[in-house]
Amino acid sequence: MQEQAISEIQAAETLEALQLVKTRYVGKSGLVTKELGTLGKLPPEERKARGAEINVVRAAIQAALDEKEAALKRAALDARLQSEAVDVTLPGLPLPAGGLHPISRVYDDLIGIFTRMGYEVAEGPEVEEEHYNFEALNIPWYHPARELQDTFWLEDGRLLRTHTSNMQIRYMLEHEPPLKMVSRGKVYRFEATDATHEAMFHQLEGLVVGEGISMADLKGTIAEMARGLYGASAKVRFQPSYYPFVEPGADFAVYWDNPRGESKWLELGGCGMVHPNVFKAVDDLREAAGKERVYEGKTGFAFGLGPERIAMLKYGIPDIRYFYANDPRVIGQFRGEL
Ligand code: FA5
């Protein structure tokens, strides 16, 4: 029986199979256990010797069981370690790195320059009331200047703002002078697109209001912005221009000293001294909202510029439409670069 048991033990390939063998021989009603139960029927003089004999067999079977159990457990552990092994020398998977859109980069530069000069940053709606986009900016419905900014109208009479100058009105409604504010955001014009014009583009608006603010302050501010963008030797140029919400008004350009050798004047935006009619319109709105009239008699300047123009030159992008065409080959070039 011992030999039979031991060969069965050795043949067991799993712990479950081994357990069956164990039950069969040394379990409660196993063969060895039953054999021990027969001792009582033997004459007393034979009992002792027979008992000792069976115990030897049982001990041998038990030892074989223990040994096999330990071996099977070791094998199971080895198999698990093998299957769960991590090869720390394998190369990692590359994680795709995101990147900031070139317009975001230009905005970050500009906002940095102006916040260092003490400007607050404000944000406002792209879907706008006609009054904030036009009337309050001294552009009544019959004014020919409306045709300079062809408009996307919404069915409810509102519009997609055509410039960020709406933020001049919104900011003055909520704040009292003296103030310095810049505001960034998307603007929309119902225009045919070409390499330098999009129907959706971006602007940065600036507004400063206080006592005795002059055109010299405006020029100094734009020059400081140019130095922030293009270094200490940057130059700015102002040309008289017309915007209904400023008087006098000007267009400004920055001389872009390109390291690749295509230096040129970059027409960036419009600016001027805030028109008294704008201050009056703001005070009217404030009064209607139960606020104090605080703007009449103040002076200030405003400017608005297009960051696309800066980004196109800075990154050598030849067509403004590439920014928003969602072509990963364009935007992908800015991955991981901050
Ligand atoms: C304005 O929008 C005025 N609100 C700017 C202003 C603000 C003047 C405050 C005075 C005081 P203008 O339409 O010229 O002005 O646009 C300003 C800048 O936006 C332009 O110089 C140009 O850089 C950019 N821009 C205008 N139209 C487009 C377009 N279709 N696509 C891309 N950029 C444009």
Image: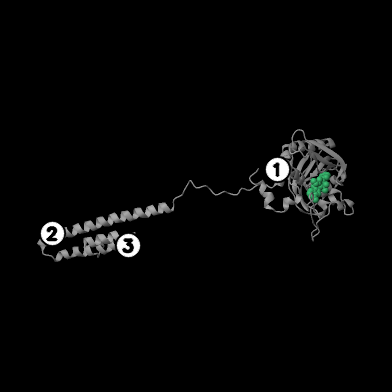
Number of other residues with Cα within 10 Å of mark 2, as a class: few under 14, some 14 to 19, many 20 or more: few
User: Which amino acid lies under the numbered mark 1 shown in the image of this protein?
Assistant: Asp
User: Which amino acid lies under the numbered mark 2 shown in the image of this protein?
Assistant: Ala
Residue 222 horizontal/vertical position (percent): 79, 38
Tell me the number on the disc at residue 108.
1
Per the model, the C-alpha gap separating discs 3 and 2 is 33 Å
* First in sequence: mark 3 vs mark 2: 3
Q: Please say whether residue 186 is visible from this viewpoint.
A: no
Q: Is residue 116 above or below residue 324?
A: above
Residue designated by label 3: 17
Left or right, 2 with respect to 182, comes to left
Number of other residues with Cα within 10 Å of mark 1, as a class: few under 14, some 14 to 19, many 20 or more: few
* First in sequence: mark 3 vs mark 1: 3
Per the model, the C-alpha gap separating discs 2 and 1 is 98 Å
User: Which amino acid lies under the numbered mark 3 shown in the image of this protein?
Assistant: Ala
Task: Residue at 17% x, 65% y: name it.
Answer: 38
Task: Residue at 26% x, 60% y: name it.
Answer: 7
